[in-house]
Amino acid sequence: MFKTPSNKVLPRQGDPRKFAQHGVVLEGYIAASDLPRVTEATENSGGEIQVKLEFKISEEKKKVVVGTANAELSLICQRCLEPVTVPVQSNISLGIVWDEEGANKLPPHFEPWIAGEGIADLYDMIEEELLLSLPAVAYHEEPCIDSKLYSSGKPVEVKREKNPFQVLEQLKSSPKS
């Protein structure tokens, strides 16, 4: 089994099918700036993404890759609109397939990774998984704005205006003779 040290840069490309046949384990990091869509979705492109990928043959005799990608990413707090650092963890569990037909044959606990023949871009796959793991809303854990700003202080009175369909409601509820 081949294993890269975790303090090394993860290789960008590799043959996922050969890796699975040989039981390759890759550990390392990726500079967040090397993932353009993650950079675009975050506030700051600095930092590293720690990645561990294990390529193997599953119990169902499918070529798969399982692992994790962990990062501390800077997003915009939706309360105060200032940057907030959020831990993001992506659990990777992908079946390596040729096409949609192969994807349909995967067990339900594997998502498909449609990889062509030969070399594939591992960074694209990791980027996709990280994007799916980003929180829908980011905010500071501690209060970042004054709670008095959440309300106006006065209860709002709702005025009932005359409903134009009120006549129809009366006609509907009246008994027919």
Image (spheres, grey):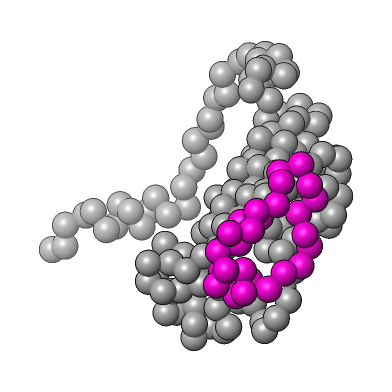
- The quarter in which the N terminus is drawn is bottom right
Q: Magenta segment range?
A: 1-26
Residue 128 inside the magenta-drawn segment:
no
83 lies left or right of 91: right
- Residue 112 vertical position relative to residue 74 in the rendered view, above or below: below
Residue 8 inside the magenta-drawn segment:
yes
Q: Residue at x 71, y 46 (%)?
A: 5
- Residue 89 vertical position relative to residue 122 in the rendered view, above or below: above
173 lies left or right of 163: left
119 lies left or right of 57: right
Residue 72, percent from left and from top:
72, 36
Q: Residue at x 68, y 25 (%)?
A: 140
Residue 143, percent from left and from top:
67, 17
Q: Which quadrant would residue 154 be assigned to in this image?
A: top right
Residue 167, percent from left and from top:
38, 53
Q: Residue at x 72, y 19 (%)?
A: 144
- The quarter in which the C terminus is drawn is bottom left
Residue 119, percent from left and from top:
73, 76
- Residue 59 vertical position relative to residue 91 in the rendered view, above or below: below
Q: Residue at x 83, y 47 (%)?
A: 31
